[in-house]
Amino acid sequence: MIKKFIEALKGRRMSPPPWWLMRQAGRYLPEYRELRARAKGFLDFCYRPEMAVEATLQPLRRFGMDAAILFSDILVVPDALGQKLEFREGEGPVLEPLVSSRDIARLEPENLDRHLAPVYAAVRRIADELPAEVALIGFAGAPWTVAVYMVEGRGGGERTKIRDWFRARPADGETLLELLADATVAHLSRQIESGAEAVQLFDSWAGGLDDEEFRRFVIAPTKVIVAKLKAHHPGVPIIGFPREAASRYPEYARATGVDAIGLDGAVVPAWAVREIAGGCALQGNLDNRVLVAGGARLADEARRILDGFRDRPHVFNLGHGVLPETPPAHVAELAQIIRAWKD
Ligand code: CP3
């Protein structure tokens, strides 16, 4: 059975292209909110295979995407390493920040496999239950983005704590990024061995770095992860998503060896098609606010993206995750627009 999504990642152009949406499971779906209300907390939800399986399958039943993404979170890795983590209602994730090399030394990579066993159990069950033409995506946060949460204690912001720390004591930065690269390889390998057919690395906080930082913190660890995964699992495509990398997408694609690159909503398709080397498939990049808006604007923007990437292997997606206020009917409209498109 041909899986359109895997074919596109391997370099085949298709009309219409395969599609899925980042954060396609989540609070915009009433059936997700109902399931979520039955869990003790968000982490409990992630570690209960029957719940993770159900949340993964919910969007597919409604919209029939070409790929499912495991329902989990990038922060299960710091949790497995023993860092204190809480998901607060309305506030998002909060971690007890790492402040010194001693905190790095206290992390417990040897616990990863045991702690994340329920995640791999969920992957196995999803792989069993998916329709034959639908591919299963595993994922992890890239080392830099996970390190941002571990050092800042939360996402976003100016990332001054981590940039100051890594500038003042670069050896600590290297140690943490190397530890996270190894943990990421282990986590993604176990997902692949459990049934994931492609993997995506989310580098959500890759923006706002200078050139040297981008090379050391984003490109270098990603390159190590890609090389190690390719050595063990050569046929499994890897998608890199360095959000807000702006003019650096071409260098990232060239230097890391990813099979495909996820483009955020700011990237102009014609520019990406021209500047990003031909061997790399392109994924993206509808603005998630346009999906909230719906209507003629959604139809126009979706077609502009479909037209813009027509000459390349393309996977239709958003430029960032589905927002909780997105009307599910707009996702159904988008599915129709994609399926009706012809180049
Ligand atoms: O459908 C899917 O895409 C699969 C599941 C998935 C989740 N998080 C579930 C989730 C994926 C792929 C992620 C990745 C993730 N998690 C990223 C990278 C992508 C991005 O958005 O930049 C990041 C940075 C995180 C960390 C994280 N997890 C944040 C910042 C938050 C709070 C913000 C929010 O949307 O609530 C979470 C919680 C989270 N992860 C939820 C879901 C469905 C909502 C939790 C809830 O239901 O209460």
Image (cartoon, helix red, strand yellow):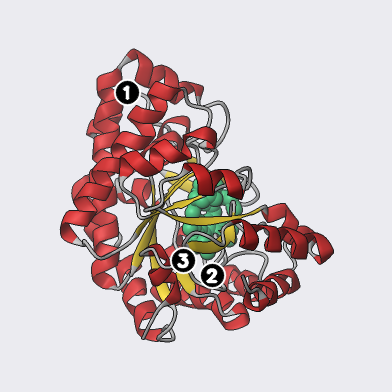
Q: Residue 12 is drawn in which quadrant?
A: bottom left
Which of the two marks, 1 or 2, is nearer to us in this view?
2
* Above or below, comparing residue 10 to residue 168 in the picture: below
* Above or below, comparing residue 56 to residue 236 in the picture: below
Q: Residue 50 is drawn in which quadrant?
A: bottom left
The residue that mark 2 highlights is 17
User: Outermost residue toward the top?
Assistant: 168
Would you call the spot at circle 2 few (<14 residues within 10 Å), some (14-19), or many (20 or more)? many
- Is ligand 1 within 8 Å of the beta carbon of the residue shown at mark 3? yes
Q: Residue 322, percent across and down? A: 63, 59
Q: Earlier in the sequence, mark 2 or mark 3?
A: 2
The reply to whether the C-beta atoms of the residues labelled 1 and 3 are less than 8 Å apart is no
Q: Residue at x 21, y 62 (%)?
A: 233
Q: CA distance from mark 1 to mark 3?
A: 32 Å
Describe the element under mark 3 as helix, strand or loop: loop
The residue that mark 3 highlights is 71
Amino acid at circle 2:
Pro
**Circle on res. 227:** none
| Near-viewer residue (318 or 140) | 318
Q: CA distance from mark 1 to mark 2?
A: 47 Å
Figure quadrant of the N terminus: bottom left
Q: Residue at x 57, y 43 (%)?
A: 271
The residue that mark 1 highlights is 100
Q: Residue at x 54, y 70 (%)?
A: 17
Q: Residue 29, percent across and down? A: 66, 71
